[in-house]
Amino acid sequence: MEVFAFLFDGFAIAFAPLNLMLIVAGVVVGLFIGAMPGLGSVNGVAILLPMTFLVPPTSAVIFLAAIYYGAMYGGAISSIMLGIPGASTAVATTFDGRPLALKGQADKALVAAATASFVGGTISVVLFTLFALPLAEVALAFGPPETFALMVLAFATFIGLGGDDISKTLFSIFIGLVFSAVGLDIISGEPRLIFGGLTGFYHGINFLVLAIGIYGIGEMLWTIEVSQGEAMMSKATVSFRRIINILKELRSSARTMVMGSFLGYFVGILPAAGATPGSLMAYGIAKTIAKNPETFGKGNVDGVVAPEAANNAASTGSMLPMLTLGIPGSPTTAILLGGMVIWGLEPGPLVFVDHPDFVWGLIASLYVANLFALLINIGFIPAFIWVLKMPFTILAPIIFVLCIIGGYVPTMSMHDVWLMLIFGVVGYLMRKLDYPMAPAVLAIVLGPLAEPALRQSLIGSQGEVMIFFERPISGTIMAIAIILFALPLIKIVRNRLKKPKLNA
Amino acid sequence: MRIAELVMALAMAALSLYLMWKSMELPIGWLPGRGPGGGAFPFWLSLGMFLCCVSIILRWIVRASPPSRSTEPYMTAQTVKWFLLVAGSLTAMIGLIHVIGVYGAVPLFLIYYVRFLGRHSWKMAGALAIFTPVATFFFFEIALKKTLPKGFTEPLFYPLYDIFL
């Protein structure tokens, strides 16, 4: 019952005129960002975070969460209309969304995507509401060893579930952590890693510099390279009567929507998993359990519904560890977590105690954002299609300018702008060689939390590393982390054992 | 692609060694009563980076990773051209911000990008070059109270400060 009282207070905050306006604005911006090929929620949140200094932290996080939410809805639009995923989270939507559009049923695909997103969003927000407080209460008992073990777990998920080259993933994690150590040593206060004696390094490397560099400049360079071909736009006209008919048809997809929602939510909680694998897994399961799996890939509406429900549910799921444990569940929530630090909030379970208005205002805003995203998405489909026609050579320079100014504003230092350009260019060159970038962003956000937790734990135990394994909670978390680290190795051994059998 | 994979791994290995050396400016071992030294965290992580690079190079030798097996070019001539034009113009814009400020460099960049790279009309390029700095000024300088660099054009803004701030 306590939860409902908090949630009620949260709604009072979410419905405050400023916050309501920010929810609507955030959803609209998010929908457009999500719909633009090459841009997803992480790019939008990274580039626009510096703009939120105008409003109080609660309003700022409400705005950014609405962008996150809107982008999850918007990603489906270009997947269906252009056949190009608006973001990686909408890749699976292309598989059946595009064939539906090519068959002249783009409207059906768009309405199905929006409805599934709404169902996924609603189920996940309810789960979020129910799980958040109990998990935060458990986390309140965490000491430095448990906190550090959680960080290790977050990184282990990238190794175990990320699916990228392990050496390159580890490299990405390590370099992010090293960059997070630049500046003043947190315990002795001595300068550390001041490259070339440049004074700009004394204040450390702001996570936004890396995030905007990689997700702003690097992503733009990447998109410029891959979008050199012309895309073919499908046609869609949506009428009220047609929407009602489609909604009636979608009743048969209810089971798939619910499955995608639950799956997406729980996959979203895992740091390395998130919305992209969540949606792909949901698509796979929908196909497996379908009565007519052969129609998948040829325009089966369940193939749109499952990934769309899952990616929205995952976006909410990824906020659960961010708020309760101080561990982001996705790159976007990593940036939100960094934002919390900038706004003067300490990420972790204490936020529930010290700043309940922030937490419950955010949770309630997710309910509201979900509803607005559905209405705006369906109501403004022609507007989104118009934006998709906007030449990239107009959009790209505007985003570059936003990146440059966004990189300058947090620290008011041109040093950071140059650093951001270097990160963007090098990040782009590394991405071409399959170096994953998300672990580095996660690491630079978690580094300032992981290092003190590690050092405090070791000081407390007189240098005995067994402290992480002897305490029940940290020991359990570490055991899971070790299993995740070993997962790729187990896969290799299993494949080798299978091969001789196949050859025999 | 294969050569690029090796060059990148070697460059990152060199960076890792530099970071290890740089971390050693502070103690990297155990300090009695004070725990791990200030350099320990970055030092051991940089060592981890270096070992990852060694692994990437070993996988390159046995052609285990996709880029080390790839026969595709790392960048086509067209991509190199676009990359240099875009990254070069960004570098020029940031460099110009030091001299003529945001409100001089941004319009020049937009005109260059929209008119010459994008081949849009002068009207479109001009409209963006005027609208973007004006919106930037009102949002950042007036609403957010964040002063952006103006280089030698700073005195030109004094009358605007008097009116709006």
Image (tube, coloured by chain):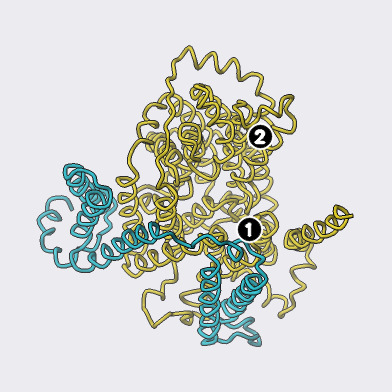
Residue A164: numbered disc:
1
**The hue in which chain A appears in the rendered picture of the protein:** yellow
Q: Position of residue B63 (x, y in %)?
A: 65, 68
Q: Position of residue B75 (x, y in %)?
A: 45, 61
The crowding category of the residue bearing disc 1, from other C-alpha atoms within 10 Å (few below 14, some 14 to 19, many at least 20), is some
Q: Which of the pair B41/A351 is nearer the observer?
A: B41
The residue wearing badge 2 is: A260
Q: Which of the pair A362/B16 is nearer the observer?
A: B16
**The hue in which chain B appears in the rendered picture of the protein:** cyan
Residue drawn at x 51%, y 82% is: B18
Residue drawn at x 17%, y 46% is: B126
Residue drawn at x 69%, y 37% is: A284
Is residue A28 in sight in this rendering?
yes
Q: Position of residue B122 (x, y in %)?
A: 17, 45
Residue B156: numbered disc:
none
Location of the C terminus of chain A (image quadrant): bottom right
Q: Amino acid at mark 1?
A: Asp
